Amino acid sequence: MIVGKDIPLPWWKKYTLTVEEASLYFGIGEKTLRRFIKEHQNEDFIIYNGIKVQIKRKVFEKYIDEKISIL
């Protein structure tokens, strides 16, 4: 077991992404993504860790594929 060490994972292996990572991954501006999160606070792809927002990568990918044409 590794204690006290952060092991960086590639994006395609992460379960959740920060807003900054999601912005780069999905090609959506951070301001646009933050506004979208604020407007969709109760969606399944959002996790709140205190005040920090995390986005469930695969769930958000599915949401985008099914429901969004343009942000």
Image: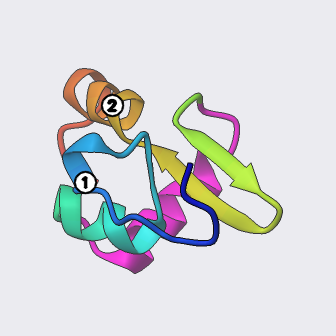
Q: Which residues are magenta?
A: 28-43
User: Residue sitting at 34 percent across and 66 percent down?
Assistant: 8
Closer to us: 58 or 34:
58
Q: Which mark is residue 53?
A: none
How crowded is the residue under tag 2: few (<14 C-alpha within 10 Å), some, or many (20+)?
Answer: some
Give the residue at the far right of this rendering: 50
Is 57 located above or below residue 24 in the figure? above
Residue underneath mark 2: 58
Residue underneath mark 1: 11
In the rendered image, which quarter is residue 53 located in?
A: bottom right
Is 37 located above or below residue 27 in the figure? above
In the rendered image, which quarter is residue 32 located in?
A: bottom left
Name the residue type under label 2: Lys
User: Residue sitting at 63 percent across and 63 percent down?
Assistant: 3
Can you tell which of label 1 and label 2 is closer to the viewer?
1
Left or right of 30, for residue 4: right
* Coordinates of residue 12 in the picture (x, y in percent): 20, 44
Name the residue type under label 1: Trp
Compare marks 1 and 2 and give the one earlier in the sequence.
1
Q: Is residue 53 magenta?
A: no
Left or right of 13, for residue 44: right
Q: Is residue 34 magenta?
A: yes
Q: Are marks 1 and 2 in contact (CB under 8 Å)?
A: no
Tell me the CA gap for discs 1 and 2. Answer: 11 Å
User: Residue sitting at 28 percent across and 54 percent down?
Assistant: 71
* Coordinates of residue 7 in the picture (x, y in percent): 40, 64
* Coordinates of residue 16 in the picture (x, y in percent): 46, 47
